Image (spheres, rainbow, N blue to C red):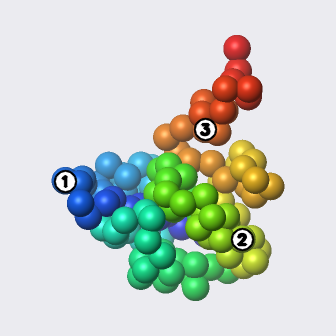
């Protein structure tokens, strides 16, 4: 099952609708979204998603920073996804399959840029 996660920060005047629409276009069957800081670990919708993961589920996000603004927390989240034998979409990041819908690791890492 494709599971989408969207997050916007509470402090900025952001709207989650564009992320949700992109996740729907990516054919996510279940969506979780919330207003919370990406640097915080107390995000109930993210924990609900992680707790309900099953083998062969695929987690999809608009951008990797929607999962976490902290590299340490991002790795912990990806490890929980891996432990559930689920996956996040394609591409490789730190040994885990992870790709955002809006940009790829290739665009953000200068030695890996394509010509």
Q: Which residue is mark 1?
A: 13
State the residue at coordinates (66%, 33%).
Answer: 109
Where in the figure is residue 53, as x and y percent of width and height?
A: 62, 79
Q: Which residue is mark 2?
A: 79
Q: Is residue 108 above or below residue 88?
A: above
Where in the figure is residue 111, as x and y percent of width and height?
A: 74, 26
As helix, strand or loop, the secondary structure at mark 1 comes to: loop
Where in the figure is residue 34, as x and y percent of width and height?
A: 34, 70
Depth check, mark 1 against mark 3: the one in front is 1
The crowding category of the residue bearing disc 3, from other C-alpha atoms within 10 Å (few below 14, some 14 to 19, many at least 20), is some
Q: Is residue 15 left or right of residue 114?
A: left
Counting residues from the start of the chain, the first of labels 1 and 2 encountered is 1
State the residue at coordinates (73%, 28%).
Answer: 112
Pick out the residue farthest to the left. Answer: 13
CA–CA distance between discs 1 and 2? 31 Å
Q: Which residue is mark 3?
A: 104
The crowding category of the residue bearing disc 2, from other C-alpha atoms within 10 Å (few below 14, some 14 to 19, many at least 20), is some
State the residue at coordinates (32%, 49%).
Answer: 18
State the residue at coordinates (58%, 85%).
Answer: 51
Where in the figure is residue 79, as x and y percent of width and height?
A: 72, 71
Counting residues from the start of the chain, the first of labels 2 and 3 encountered is 2
Q: Is residue 112 left or right of residue 38?
A: right
Counting residues from the start of the chain, the first of labels 1 and 3 encountered is 1
């Amino acid at each position: 099952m494709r599971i989408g996660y969207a997050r916007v920060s509470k402090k900025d005047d952001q709207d989650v609708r564009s992320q949700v629409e992109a996740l729907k276009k990516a054919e996510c069957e279940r969506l979780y979204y919330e207003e919370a800081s990406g640097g915080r670990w107390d995000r109930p919708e993210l924990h609900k998603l992680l707790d309900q993961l099953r083998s062969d589920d695929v987690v999809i996000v608009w951008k990797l920073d929607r999962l976490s603004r902290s590299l340490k927390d991002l790795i912990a989240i990806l490890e929980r996804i891996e432990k559930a034998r689920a996956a996040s979409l394609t591409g490789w990041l730190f040994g885990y399959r992870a790709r955002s819908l809006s940009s790829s690791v290739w665009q953000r890492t200068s030695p890996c840029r394509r010509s």
